[in-house]
Image: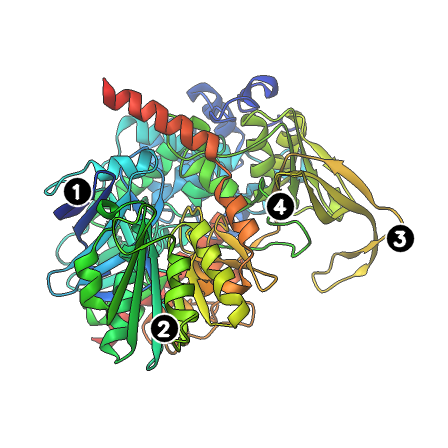
Amino acid sequence: MFKIVKKRVLTPVTKLFEVEAPLVARKAQPGQFVVVRVSETGERIPLTVAATDPKAGTVTIVVQEVGKTSSMLGRLEAGQSILDFAGPLGKPAPLLDSGHVVVIGGGFGVAPILPIARALKERGVKVTGIVGARTKDLLILLDELRESCTDVLTCTDDGSSGMKGLVTDVLKKELIDKGVHIDQVIAIGPMVMMRAVAETTRPFNLNTLVSLDPIMVDGTGMCGACRCTVEGRTRFACVDGPIFDAHKVDFDEAVRRGKMYLSEQKLAFDRYKAEVAQ
Amino acid sequence: MPIKPRTPMPAQEAEARKRNFNEVALGYTEEQALAEAARCLQCKDAPCQKGCPVGVQIKDFIGLAKKGDWVGAYDKIKETNSLPAICGRVCPQEEQCEKVCLLGKRGQPEAIGRLERFVADMAMKRGVKVQKPDDSAPGRGHKVAVVGSGPSGLTAAGDLAKLGYGVTVYEALHAPGGVLIYGIPEFRLPKAIVAEEVNLLKDLGVRFETDVIIGKTVTVDELFDMGYEAVFLGTGAGLPKFMGIPGENLNGIYSANEYLTRTNLMKAYRFPEFDTPLKSGKRVAVVGAGNVAMDSVRSALRHGAEEAFVVYRRTEKEMTARAEEFEHAIEEGVKFHFLTNPVRFLGDENGWVKGMEVQKMELGEPDASGRPRPVPVPGSNYVIDCDTVVIALGTSPNPLVSSTTPGLKTKEWGGLIVEEETGKTTKEGVYAGGDAVTGSATVILAMGAGKKAAKAIHEYIQNKK
């Protein structure tokens, strides 16, 4: 059992937890993830590490409630415990030592880019953060991001914060078109957003990394549920990734495999919502 | 005098069992067990015992069983075998103890496995009292770490704990048991039995730490820093092999590891009561013909397949599955496409598998494995319809530990290099056994390796003093 020492509600459906997991806290590097299980009948889901405090022995995760497991997790409170919390898994993000890196977070993808931005900045890399959401209130962890980046650009669908548009519009119009030199782009968020970033940078041959978030079971290379095609080769996101060269990822396949259990996920979520409503 | 045939073991009828996940074999009644025990000749030299990888004192335990002394028989088995209820169910006895049984020379051999199972179940039902080693046990004051809680790890842990060592078993998954709980299906090995064997080890003083991935959460070198004097690696062969042919990543195509892990560990057959789903369809093709393939194809029937079939590039004769598993599959209606090999998978417009193009094979000269090499027959390609595919072509050891442990050497294919008699690896204080060394093999061979390594670890620590 892994005790939740702190909870922050970032939006009505996005929750941040600091979890007591000293062994993981000591080891986790930017870009790595943990596998979590919330109940004895529950499934195993991967969640990217958003921060660690090795001294306090805590690991921070951010959860967006999109289905049964994430909602069960989101409803937990400080003082309660997470049943299983195993990691760190996956390879750490490769980090440049100098130059200019643009980190892009879409939705709750802001959480996993934080430790990457922080580590880059500590190395003396110039870090520009781009974050987007539907509206201002849904932009999460802005203060933390500003601390971790040299500069932060925001955008919203309704123009309530920053540019009206998508993160790719900001990347293109505010940076690429203006001739700003960029050594690398790292994008984490929904698959559509990561794919759009890949397509935005491809014509400029701009080194771009994404962190895939496929369905997983064990998270240690045992099952192959998370397999994806990168540069024509089958890779396991859990052990070979989760971070890959965005221009070499077969996004069609990744999107398709991500939808494999849509009807079951909906059934489980509907049953759960009915249970909770009672 | 003619030899009496062996006492049959009651089992669920094929028609009924192929639609449920309950155990197929039902086990002897006390009367049946006594009748079977009575057949044993009690040979002076007990050849059966030499046929057992963990050296179970078969003659003596059956001798006690003849008198109905089930507890005595259980204690006798337990002297050398920590997991009798499991071995009685999944050991290939026909290739080991029963193969050399004298009764077998003139008729059917003694049903040693069935008796072992009965004795273990009977003892567990009556409540087993674990004898904890006392404070003068040689292992007291010494700590050993066991990595992986599959058959080799559990065996090593049990043997070391009996000697008084402080044993901690580290498991990457959320529950202990390794392949016994994620791989072998409920209908062959009920998970409650595995849990019970694990609990008996806990009673003996073994500690279990789940959710710890050695090589990631903690490295082997850090285990030594934590005060462990020796480490046993029973990390298994967890990496699934794929075929590398077009269409393999279509939706609905699983590795056997994933298909069975979802089913057994995550209990997908009880979805939505359990949250993990599995998409097992009406026409399920399983590629490969080992025990894991049999477990997969028989699971497919229980998940509701109208037709579940095996596609194998050789013939019945070269299959690596146990004869009993093959027979059970046939009884349940599994079809076999021999001398058939997939060349690509075909998908529908949504990216779901809808069939596989196969080619016919014929057997040629023996290959490196000693089995005839399958050779494609030109122009023999055709398509088999299916909506689910399970690839069961074997597994290889997971590099998580070897790649993070300086000094630990592996063979080219990933198997850890060890001294055969001791399980000693190339790194001081580190021992290994089971599938992590041999590649996918059997539960009992892994247990035998765990046993040898436990003995070697004991000697290593005692001599170090």
- Label 4 vs label 3: CA separation? 26 Å
Q: Chain of mark 2?
A: B
Name the disc covering residue B405, or none: 2
Q: Quadrant of the N terminus of chain A?
A: top left
- Label 2 vs label 4: CA separation? 32 Å
Same chain, labels 3 and 1: no
Give, as a three-letter code, the residue at label 2: Thr
Which residue is the site of mark 1? A81
Which residue is the site of mark 4? B290
Mark nearest the camera among 2 and 1 is 1
Q: Residue at x 23, y 17 (%)?
A: A278
Mark nearest the camera among 2 and 4 is 2
Give, as a three-letter code, the residue at label 1: Ser
Which residue is the site of mark 3? B378
- Label 3 vs label 1: CA separation? 61 Å
- Label 4 vs label 1: CA separation? 41 Å
Callout 2: SS: loop
